[in-house]
Amino acid sequence: MSKEGTVTYQGFTKEELSKRIIYDPVKGIFLNAKTNEVMNVVKGSKHSILLRVGFSVVTLSPAKVAFFLKDGLVVKSNQVVKFKDKNRTNYAYDNLLIINKDYGCKEGYVHPYTTPTQHKRINLLHPSMVYVVMRGPEQAVYRTPDYDKAVAILTEWMEDNSIHRWDETLPDYYMPQEGIR
């Protein structure tokens, strides 16, 4: 699809993708370049643009396509796209923001599907709406629907990080039997 040395996203150059998709940065919509019809980018809970290439289908991230078509930017693997208004279906260019994943930072990492709370290591996870106490950037210590309990677990863990509590979000058959904890 592309020549060596050319910037590509999922194998497409900006010119090749522009022949298939038209991006309106003000409205945040994607149009099929051949039919000029609005492309459906949300199917169920998935946000993606599907393009047929020969006998296969290529899945593209709408937010990443927006950056690629507007500025020729490819979102790197150590970056994520955030939505300024927290509406994951608003692809208006002014609403999109590329941020670096901060894997080296133990505190303050915010997963794309979470909302931070006043405690740096407690985030509200969407759509399950449980509070997640974080040990590190990618490791959850405890999940609970009760914010006060999350704060108590965090406080306990900060005093002694060898303590481990089984959270209540797993089904009972995964939970260890009494006396094994």
Image (cartoon, rainbow, N blue to C red):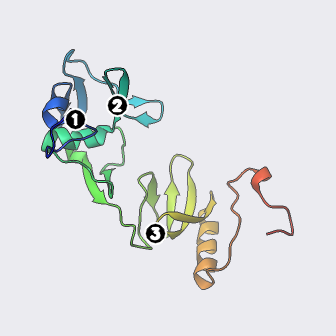
According to the picture, the residue beneath numbered tag 1 turns out to be: 12
The mark closer to the camera, 3 or 2, is 2
| For residue 6, side relative to residue 63 (left or right) | left
Between 87 and 178, the one lying in front of the other is: 178
Q: Amino acid at mark 1?
A: Phe
Q: CA distance from mark 1 to mark 2?
A: 10 Å
Q: Residue furthest bottom?
A: 159
Q: CA distance from mark 3 to mark 2?
A: 40 Å
Q: Amino acid at mark 2?
A: Val
According to the picture, the residue beneath numbered tag 3 turns out to be: 118
Q: Residue at x 33, y 58 (%)?
A: 78
According to the picture, the residue beneath numbered tag 2 turns out to be: 58
Crowd class of label 2 (few under 14; some 14 to 19; many from 20; radius 10 Å)? few
Between 148 and 79, the one lying in front of the other is: 79
Between 150 and 178, the one lying in front of the other is: 178
Q: Is residue 128 above or below residue 46?
A: below
| For residue 127, side relative to residue 81 (left or right) | right
Mark toward the start of the polypeptide (1 vs 3): 1
Q: Which mark is residue 89?
A: none
Q: Can I make out residue 80 in this image?
A: yes
**Element on which disc 1 rests:** loop
Image position, residue 152 (x, y; %): 63, 74
Crowd class of label 3 (few under 14; some 14 to 19; many from 20; radius 10 Å)? few
Marks 1 and 2: CB-CB under 8 Å? yes
Q: Residue at x 53, y 65 (%)?
A: 139
Mark toward the start of the polypeptide (3 vs 2): 2
**Element on which disc 2 rests:** strand
Q: Is residue 72 above or below residue 104?
A: above
